[in-house]
Image (tube, rainbow, N blue to C red):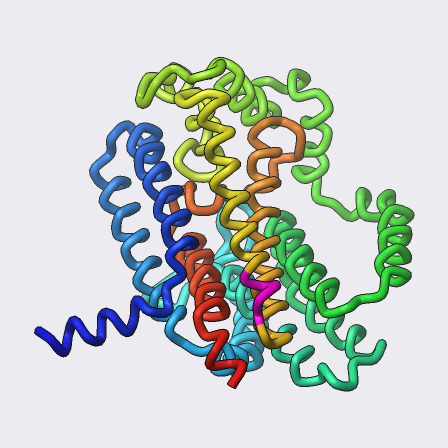
Amino acid sequence: MPRTSHWLLRGLRHVDGILLTLVVLVLGISLAVVTSASGQSPVRISGHLVNMGLALVLMVLIANVPPHLLSKVGPPLYATGVILLVGVALFGEIRNGARRWLDLGFIAFQPSELLKLALPLMLAWYFQRNEAVLRAKHFMVGGILLLVPFLLILRQPDLGTALMLGASGFYLLFFAGLPWKVILGGATLGAASLPVVWGLMHDYQQRRVLMLLDPASDPLGAGYHIIQSTIAIGSGGLFGKGWMQGTQNQLDFIPERTTDFIYAVFGEEFGYAGAILLVCLYLAIVARGLVIAARAPTLFGRLMAATLSLNLFTYVFVNMGMVSGILPVVGVPLPLMSYGGTALVTLLLGMGILMSVATHRQLNKS
């Protein structure tokens, strides 16, 4: 027993208390909302608890791995992810018209989830390795490393994940020192290419953008998600209708209410005050991550901490904007809130990396 306690204490020594508290608070809210959104389904509740427990254990384990060892995982993990994406393109399982899943017999999963961590790990490793001699060519290589998985995921098609991955890669390149003239030039080129991009988009993707402008033009079709979610959020008022008292939720009007549109359930039941509290918790997590980045003694630690923090902010902003009707529906879950094991594990592995950077500072300095 003493030896077990000793190992447990050593493991918890590398857990950032502030970050853990904030994460657990959001997970607690998530459990309450999933319970309501699922109609108190024992299967969903138990599944969510199992997902949270597994993700938290993995987070603590990763927190105990020093950053210099984590950096070495980047290249093989990135190569594995790209190979799996090629496998999806060749042999992937088609679901709902998209080839995103790879069935290995004993498990079916989306390799794009792996790239959410593999890409920043790879880029952070690459830039730290070349920190003393960074030139324009290194940013070009970084751009190619980003472009390969981006195009493979875009081809599936999975526009939402591709855009989120692109944002993640951009953040890391930016914090690595990408020149402003390159950023402004890329932004100008991107804006000029919008008509071409529009023509290359699939019909359902174009409909999603058009529905953002006028969802009432197809209230029972493409505009249904936005209409019902905004009704739910608006009807919540200042303090909400109460836990498990939301009529839009209980009467099954809100689509995908345990996953992508869980924020609509939350807004209806807890209102504007609850939404402010949730946003503050997310901002506190992001702020803590940026503080960790600012204090990190190595370039790898700074790049990973800053990128993972802004990734979380981006996912929250896109999901809340999508559910509130100010952004197109792109199928992005709400971090730490939406039901789903793969996304939660990926996210808490990222939190574990943040904790590793935060708690191994003295070891890195020496």
Q: How many callouts does the rendering have?
A: 0
Query: Percent from the top left, x then y, of residue 172?
Result: 68, 65
Which quadrant of the structure image shows residue 83? bottom right
- Residue shown at 43% from the left, 17% from the top: 239
Query: Percent from the top left, x then y, of residue 270?
Result: 41, 23
Is residue 343 something one can see in this rendering? yes
- Residue shown at 28% from the left, 40% from the top: 44
Query: Percent from the top left, x then y, of residue 356?
Result: 45, 70
Decide whether residue 293 is among the magenta residues: yes
Furthest-left residue in view? 1
- Residue shown at 58% from the left, 66% from the top: 295
166 to the left or right of 32: right
Segment tinted magenta in the rendering:
292-296
What's the magenta bit mostly, secondary-structure-wise?
Answer: helix
> Is 235 situated above or below 319?
above
Is residue 119 something one can see in this rendering? no
Depth order, front residue of 250/156: 250
187 to the left or right of 212: right
Which quadrant of the structure image shows residue 148? bottom right
- Residue shown at 54% from the left, 81% from the top: 365
Query: Percent from the top left, x then y, of residue 85?
Result: 57, 67
249 to the left or right of 72: left
> Is 219 situated above or below 32?
above
> Is 321 situated above or below 344?
above
314 to the left or right of 103: right
Decide whether residue 176 is among the magenta residues: no
Which quadrant of the structure image shows residue 28? top left
Depth order, front residue of 226/336: 336
Quarter placement of the N terminus: bottom left
